[in-house]
Amino acid sequence: MAAVNITEPEFAEIIENNELIILDFWAEWCGPCKAYGPVYERVSEEFPDVVFGKINTESEQALAGYFNVRSIPTTVAFKEGVGVFSQPGALPEEALKDLVIQLQNLNMDEVRAAIEEENNTETE
């Protein structure tokens, strides 16, 4: 599936209703974003069961602020509604493919248990 543009009104619904979402925070004026865009698009075509979303930081400043995006491009991933990855900078094509495969294989029961354990530790 090709990458889709995501805006704030539909953001929560997309996160809640899809198992794996990869987000690219970008801007039109950003040189590295322009170089990363075709890579991101090619990889999105290889994983039709994954939602690849593009968020324009100029028009979606609230989302960029919520994710504390300080440099672009920034890649963010959600699996089963949980944020599981965030990294600034353009990823090489093979690294992005590898990331998607790792996220597809990520055991979310283990992730939730680790989050719960961390939250319990912080409240003690």
Image (spheres, grey):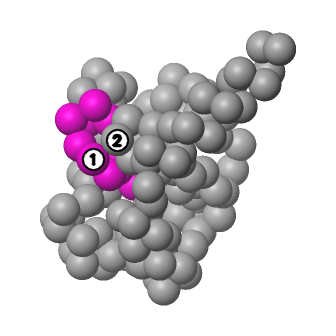
Three-letter amino acid code of the residue under disc 2: Glu
Q: Can you name the residue that lies furthest to the top here? A: 123
Q: Residue at x 45, y 37 (%)?
A: 82
Magenta residues (range):
14-27
Q: CA distance from mark 2 to mark 1?
A: 5 Å
Q: First in sequence: mark 2 or mark 1? A: 1
Figure check: 26 above or below 102: above
Q: Residue at x 46, y 69 (%)?
A: 102
Of residues 62 and 111, the one nearer the viewer is 111
Relative height, residue 42 to residue 26 (above, below): below
Estimate how packed mark 2 is, as few (under 14), some (14 to 19) or many (20 or more) residues with alpha carbons within 10 Å: some
Q: Is residue 57 above or below residue 101?
A: above
Q: Residue at x 36, y 64 (%)?
A: 104
- Residue topped by disc 1: 19
Indicate which disc residue 80 carries. Answer: 2
Quadrant of the image containing the C terminus: top right
Mark 2 and mark 1 residues within 8 Å of each other at the beta carbon? yes
Helix, strand or loop status at disc 2: loop
Residue 21: in magenta span: yes
- Toward the viewer: 66 or 77? 77
Magenta highlight on residue 5: no
